[in-house]
Every structure is written in structure tokens, then in C-alpha cells.
Amino acid sequence: MPSPAKKRKNNAPESSPQRMRSIESFFRGQATKRAKTAANPAEPVSESKQEVLTDEELARKLQAEWDREDRAAASSAQPAESAHQAEQLKSSTPLPAPVNDVRAKSEAVRTKETLSLQSSIGSEDTIVSSIPFDQSPLTFEPSKYVDELQRHWASDGGDATYALLTRGQGLKTLYDKHGDAGDVAFEAKKRQSFTLKRPKPLTIKGVYQSLMKIAKSKGPGSQESKQRIVEKLLQDSRGAEESRYIVRILVQNLRIGAVKTTMLIALARAFLFSKPKGAEFTVRSPQELSRLKKEELADVYSKAEEIVKASYARHPNYDDLVPCLLEIGVTEELLVRCGLTLHVPLRPMLGSITRDLSDMLTKLQGRDFACEYKYDGQRAQVHCDEKGKVSIFSRHLELMTDKYPDLVSLVPAIRGESVSSFILEGEVVAVDPDSGELKSFQILTNRAKKNVELGSIKVNVCLFAFDLMYLNGEPLLDRPFRERRELLRSLFTEIPNRFTWVKSLDATSADSDAVLEFFKGATEAKCEGIMVKVLDNVAKSEPDKSVGISYEREEMEQEVLESEQNGQDGLQSIKSEPKEKVSRRKPLLATYEPDKRLESWLKVKKDYSTSSDTLDLIPIGAWHGQGRKAKWWSPILMAVRNPETGVLEAVTKCMSGFTDKFYQANKEKYSEGGENVISRPSYVEYAGEPDVWFEPQEVWEMAFADITLSPTYTAAIGLVSDERGLSLRFPRFLRVREDKSIDEASTSDDLAALWRKQVERSKMEEVHQVADEDEKLGWQED
Ligand code: ATP
């Protein structure tokens, strides 16, 4: 199923066949044009040249046209035309003195339209650019700037200008650091731009309203009206900076590294430090917070962030979240006021990958868990209110009620008498309606995406329910899985081959044979493997023996630091010196944790059982091949994504696992001068310079020998070591993940987690080795 990100990408002009020009070519072009114009300024610009006019050429051309028109108007003195022009003028700029005669009006029009090369920088811009947005909130004093800004805005209706959003120093610093050629070119263009008249400043509210109009317009003629709104926004934007962000907002990629997490953290901090006039909640003053110790401050921040993130995970809608924050600030109450709500999809809980069954059994040692078939279909969240209204949402929160009218029609029958409202979750799978035999995911994709008619359904489906998150007006997220599952199975009614429970087996790590049988059964039934879920929370008095959540980050960093201080490679020293250490593990929770990928849900896939861990990486660049591979790209630079910053972090160069056919197709796809080869992107982190940069657009699954701490690659830097990133040894291409968009590629956190796992594995091996040796020694001594 394409994710929204995938769709976004498909629609985004950025992904359209348009190659980013190199900065050199930009300046070369401009310089040639300037030279020509300077040589003969009066030269009329030909039609064919019009497409490539510089701003200056356009300005001169318009000026020449207007002069010609004025001369013609003056000689024929057409009253009607002049009156019309005067009318136009009246509606836009009131004249300072009464102008009665037509001639004077015509003169005034000419004066108004005479090209003036105005600078688009005003005094407000000076104030905005002097605001130190990059300063710590502990020292930043907004009150210094607010009054002055508000005075400026008052003359234009009082709304904050859009310029405020587009000129903070922080963004500038970021551009300077990353030096995106496209952005630099844009900067250069900005300096050359001339405006015919100073447009009324765009306001944040105005831009927002225009975007809403675009989002809401539909039906015949909507294409044109959307286009007009965009044109107007671009016309009205003052200078390149504003138009840059207008365009980026429209293509839904701001390229400033601000992702969902950044937004939520920013909101949490904003409401820690400030509140609107009249709001009754308490905020902490910067002075008070700056007196706290570093760890105490981090704690204050993270508590607030957790609340905002939890609220968003349960109710992902900024239109509801922000008004709530304005009213009550960051308090636990936010989870009640802006929490789980019928017909608003919550972000699903996700499962972590495991290497194989024994890895899973080791992780869940000492815990009761449920093994469930991992069906190969489409995840569905079904909401039903007391009135019987049903909404169905996808894994990516898209509304798909129209796609499954057959499931909607089942609701009255599956909902037991005592159920008034609910949110349940399950996997929709294509099935044979008579035998119930499972069909492949490919069959399911043949179903239309919307407006499916009940009478004309050819792809029959069954919903295999696995969780219940809300019942009769109450969220169940905090209840353990065993209880939620019990409610689901006792209060709802199965309908053979249409609505039923996922096949499951309750077990513990001692039941390895039964679990293996169950796993085999799942794969034979064409399932992808099994999902394993912790059934109960650990009682407070009991220690959690499971090793699900391995190292705490600080602990890991400490180990690396210690080993590095000893002058050793972090990984090597950990391998050779297993330490006796009680790690602070968080117990695995059996609660439903929206938007979290915890180890209380584990995925064991059939393709994992033979191979070891793999990563889903994004190809971002390449070098010219050598020898036999000279006509292709090889090696290819691969990256993980950092969801916190939006940056793609290079992690390895891959040159094995590719067939010649694949190499050929790859070279055609990323041909030099083609649409998929771009100039160095600002959102990539890599110290080197490949021969070409790819427009990131696909995900490749990679196998590898192991993960190493690297002095060159910065992927996951700060997660296991402050100085070094992580890299892969002997990476090998396995396959293209057609089903994943780049937003679903492995993250730096995944990489760090695999590294920790590797360290832990080598420690275990070490322990076993020592035990084996002890045993041998004991035997010899005997
Ligand atoms: P994820 O959805 O975890 O981000 P992914 O897209 O790679 O990762 P998979 O690794 O295939 O997906 O596994 C997770 C998906 O498996 C779930 O999102 C859900 O759609 C599906 N699934 C099938 N059976 C179950 C089950 N019994 N419990 C939970 N999920 C299930």
C-alpha cells in the first residue's frame, strides 16, 4: 500500500522530471545574459528569448513596452482608455491630490507604472532579521520585539506577517552549513530581484487561509482556482525567501529538518515557557528554569514532550491539539481533552524486528506472550460510535471506509448487544469466501481504493481482529493486552470467513517446540510469520527477566566512552571484556502504546529465520564503476534516515549483491543529466563526495556482516558514541522494497538498536565461550 509519503512524493513537483542545475551553471547563465543586456540595453527582447529572461531583462522589456504605450496614448489621447487606467489606479493607490483632467490622470498612471527598482526589504524585515531565533529559550526575550512588530502589523490589519516565519537566523545558519546549491541560487536570484510595486505583506493567517482554500477546493474548475491561489501567493510574496517557503509548503517538504517530532517538541517547549494572555495554566519562567541542573532541565523538557507526543499519537490533529494547549498548557489533562476520539485515527502501535525464533524466545524469557499469525494484508482501524456510524482507517491513517463497504455492513452483526461504541484493529486479508483460504497481498491490491459498490465486489476479504483500543466511551490503552483481547473476543461475534480473530497461541519461552510448530503453521498458511505480544504487565514486586528493551542509551555511551578512553575500539573492547553489570531495563509493557515501536510486540518473519538482520536503506549517490563495472554505478552510497532531523545519514557503500541487469537498470534510472541525478542535497550527511547524487526515492533491503563504529560515517552519531557514527561491513544488496517509501526506510535508531544487539550477542557468545572453557577445564581437572 502506498504510504501518504509515497503519494506525496509522486505528486510533489520536486519529484517531477526536473534536474537541479548546478550552481556553476546558474551563474554562468546569468552572467551571459547580463553581458548581452549590458552590451545593448535598448535591444528589444525577442519572443523566443522571453522564456529565459532575467528579472532585469523583463523589467527593461516592460519599461520599453509601457513607454511605447504611453507615447501612443498621449498622441491619440483616448479618454476612455485613460479613464479606465485611472480607475485602476484609484482602486489600488489613492492619489494625494484631486486629479481632474484626463491628461493628468494619464500622467499619474504613467508615473505609477514607471518601473521603480525597489528594494523589498522594509523596516519590519530589519526587526525580524534582528530577532535571535536561534537563541536558547532560557535567555531569549520575545517581549523585546513583540511591541515593535505589533505596531508594524497594526497598519495592515494586525496579523503577523509571513516574513516572520521565513526569516529566522537558525534557518540561515542551517543553509550556510549545508550549502544547498538550489538554495544558494535562489539567494543569488533574490538579490537581483526587482519589484514593480511593493506588494502588501503576506500574513501567516492569509497564507494559511489560502492553503486551506487549496485543500478544500474540489470539483470542476478546482484545478484552475488552485492554480490562481498559488499564483497570487507567489506574486504577493516579498522576495525569494517567502516564495521559497510558499513553494516548499505546497510540495509539503520544507527541507529544514522539521519533522513531526520537531514540531511536537517545539510545541511542548513553547507552552512550558509561555502562555497566551488570560490563560490560567502556570508556566515556568526562563530564570527559574535556567537555575536547574542540566539533567533536571532535561527531565522537565522530556516530561512535557512525552505528554504532547502521547496526545498527538492518540489524536493526531494539530487543529485540536493547539487550541487545547492554548487553554490548558502541557498537563496530563491534555490526554483527556485531546486524547483518543472516535473517528479520529490513533497512530498504530508497531512491532520490533527479531532475528529469528530463538532471538524472540530469549527476549521474552519469563513472560507470558501470545503468538499470532502475521497476516499479509492491510492493517485496518475500525471506529464505530453509538449511532452506528463507522469509519475505517489504514496503517497510515488514511480514511478507507469507501474501500470496504462490506466490512462496514458487518458491523451491526459483529457488535454484541453490550457494545455501544468501539475502536478495534485487525488485518484485512483477501480470502476465498467459501473456504476461507488466505489469498496473497497482490490479490488484495486489485480492490479499488474508493467508491467500492457492495454489489460488485470481486475481491472478498476477511478482517482478522487482534486488538480493542476503545469500548463504550472508554479508552482501553492502559489495560494489559490479555484484558483487551478478552473483551474483544467475548463481546464481539465472529462471522466465518468475514470477521474473526487472528489465530493465536499463548506461550512462554519454555514452550519452544509448540512455538516452532505454530510458526511453521503460519508460514504454511501463507502468512508472513508471527507477531508476538506480551500479555501482562509485570507486577511491581516482580523483577522483569525479559531482555526486550536492551541497553539504555547512556549506559551504552558510557561503555563506548570507557573503552575509547582505554584507547580501544569500542566494539572490540566490549567484545573482549564482558562486564558484570546490572542494566537498567525498562519492563516490557502489555499496554497499547500508540506510535511506539516497542519490544513488547515482536515480529518474527519467515525470511528472517534463515538470514540475520537486514536494514532498509536509501540509495543516495554513487561513483563510476571500475573495470568490468565501468559503465555502471558502483559502489552505491546508502543512507538511513534520521526522523528527528529529516536528514539522510550515509552509512555504507555497497557493491555486492547486484546483478548486471540490475546495474544496467540502475544506470538508466540514475543517468547523468537525467531527472534522478541532482546536485548535492542539503539534507544528506556525508563528508565525502560521490560522482553523482541520487534523488532519494527508493528503499533497498541490505544484508551485512556486522556494524562497526566508524570515524568516517556519521550515521547514528550521538546514539552510541558522541564522536563516531556507525557503518556496515560487507553490505550486500538483497532486494528493492517496492512496498516501502523512503519515509519507511530504516532509521538511525534502528541502526543503533542493531548495533546494541550485536554487542549484546557478542557478550553472550563470550559468556558461553567462557562457560564452555570452564566446563572443559572442570572435565580435565576431574
Ligand atoms: P511496521 O508496520 O511495523 O512499520 P512494516 O511496514 O515493515 O513495519 P511489517 O514488518 O510487515 O510491516 O509488520 C507489521 C504489520 O503486520 C502491521 O502493521 C500489520 O499490518 C501486520 N499484521 C499482520 N498480522 C498482525 C497481527 N496479528 N498483529 C499485528 N499486526 C499484524
Image (cartoon, rainbow, N blue to C red):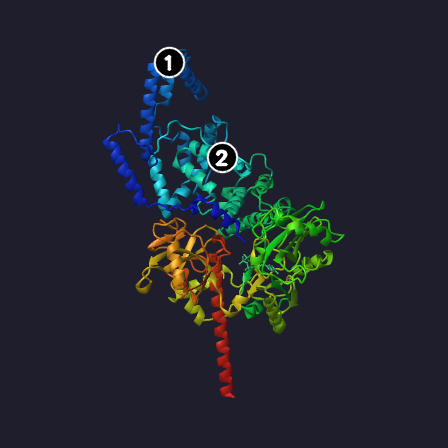
**Residue kind at label 2, given as amino acid type:** Glu
Residue 586 in sight here: yes
Ranked by sequence position, the earlier of labels 1 and 2 is 1
Q: Quadrant of residue 666?
A: bottom left
Which residue matches tag 2? 224
SS for callout 1: helix
Q: Name the foreground residue: 597 vs 545.
A: 597
Res 104 label: 1
Badge 2: residue crowd in 10 Å (few <14, some 14–19, many ≥20): few
Residue 432 horizontal side relative to residue 670, left or right: right
Residue at the spot 43% in from the left edge and 51% down from the top edge: 647
Residue 382 horizontal side relative to residue 687, left or right: right
Q: Quadrant of residue 689?
A: bottom left
Badge 1: residue crowd in 10 Å (few <14, some 14–19, many ≥20): some
Measured along the vertical axis of the image, is residue 764 above or below residue 40?
A: below
Distance of label 1 from label 2 (alpha carbons)? 38 Å
